[in-house]
Image (cartoon, rainbow, N blue to C red):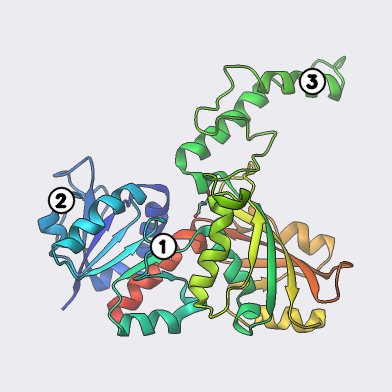
Amino acid sequence: MMKDVGFIGWRGIVGSVLLKRMVKKKDFNSINVIFFTTSQCGKIIPFSIKNKCKILQDAYNIEILSSLDIIISCQGSEYTEKMYSKLRSIGWNGYWIDASSYLRSFKKSVIVLDPINLNFIKKKIDMGIKTFVGGNCTVSLMLMALGGLFKNNLIEWLFVSTYQAASGAGSSFMKELLLQMKFISKKLNFKNHSLSILDIEKNISKNIKNSDFPKKYFSVPLAGSLIPWIDKKVCNGQTKEEWKGQFETNKILNTKKIIPIDGVCVRIGTLRSHSQSFTIKLKQNLSLNNIKNIIQSNNKWVKVISNNMDDTINNLTPVAVNGKLDIPIGRIKKLNIDKNCFSAFSVGDQLLWGAAEPLRRMLKLLINY
Ligand code: HSE
């Protein structure tokens, strides 16, 4: 019998990428999907998908939700916080798959990234675990890039500097970034040849500080600038985004001894791919060739990029990666600092491996299990 699967949050940025991927991979052929809504209950689903129920159901209707085998939610932490415990408290024992961070720190949840932790996921399914959560985007993308080194237990510690796209903050932030770019371009005046580039820069820098500069969501300019702070403050001066690096990585890998990870997370003016610069200390002095082979052989999406200008600027950028599942990693070089240290730089689509794809694959795993 086909499983009944409830899909909540399909209209949002992660949900719509997930929906598109599921259509492309024909995942809807093997489930009976019911689409839920928090605001348009009773309306017809606005796309054609082979399913029995054509009407949008109320995402707060416990009776319908509790009749489902699997719920997949991209609705966000607030919804999960409200509905997950309600359903569990009335004894609902179905599978909950979630994109938001709310359940990641629950003892009885598994953070899923199957190219990295498939065996752990399967073990937990066999143990009766029913709650599976996608990881933070930078964590998932970092593990997809460096999985081979983690798998071989080679990493002593890892420091990461991130360059995170606006999409990680949400669709309103993406739109605001574009509005900021538009605002700046409107102020450009290349026709007036008496203006030097420094005059133009002065004018733009002044205008960026105007009260009519669009910054309702970011609070400050992102276009023409950057924001070295993501999410709220936690202890030790870290932001929550930085805290997730060590916590989530070690949870995904189910490490016995914590691998120390820290970093500085920065929002930059790109649209949907996150970039990360790594400083890695290995437990031993491996040759660069060894390091590259270990990285390359971990999964079919990671692609080692040669450390030269042409390959780097053409293949190791957000523009090269947007909309793709590829995880290029380059700038791999030994550091003067220590013979066991090397650097690497990786880029990944924040909405694919960073969000939707691990959830889609988890759903598939449960359907076929
Ligand atoms: N917290 C991430 C960001 C989103 O702000 O970019 C992906 O988990």
SS label for mark 1: loop
Residue 179's place in the image compared with 107, above or below, is above
Q: Earlier in the sequence, mark 1 or mark 3?
A: 1
Residue 348 seen from this side: yes
Residue 135 appears left or right of 307: left
Q: Earlier in the sequence, mark 2 or mark 3?
A: 2
Q: Quadrant of residue 365?
A: bottom left
Q: Quadrant of residue 73?
A: bottom left
Dots 2, 3 in contact, CB < 8 A: no
**Label 2: how many Cα within 10 Å (few below 14, some 14–19, many 20+):** some
Expressed as whole percent of the image width and height from the top left, the position of residue 299 reads 58, 79
SS label for mark 3: helix
Q: Quadrant of residue 6?
A: bottom left
Q: Identity of the amino acid at label 3?
A: Lys
Q: Number of marks in the image? A: 3
Residue 24 seen from this side: no
Q: Nearer the viewer, residue 45 or 366?
A: 366
Residue 121's place in the image compared with 333, above or below, is below
- The answer to whether the beta carbon of the residue marked 3 is less than 8 Å from any atom of ligand 1 is no
Q: Nearer the viewer, mark 1 or mark 3?
A: 1
**Label 1: how many Cα within 10 Å (few below 14, some 14–19, many 20+):** many
Q: CA distance from mark 2 to mark 3?
A: 55 Å
x 67%, y 78%: residue: 295
Dots 1, 3 in contact, CB < 8 A: no
Q: Nearer the viewer, mark 1 or mark 2?
A: 1
**Label 3: how many Cα within 10 Å (few below 14, some 14–19, many 20+):** few
- The answer to whether the beta carbon of the residue marked 2 is less than 8 Å from any atom of ligand 1 is no
Q: Which mark is residue 104?
A: 1
Q: Which residue is mark 3?
A: 202
Q: Identity of the amino acid at label 2?
A: Ile
Expressed as whole percent of the image width and height from the top left, the position of residue 304 reads 71, 72
Q: Which mark is residue 55?
A: 2
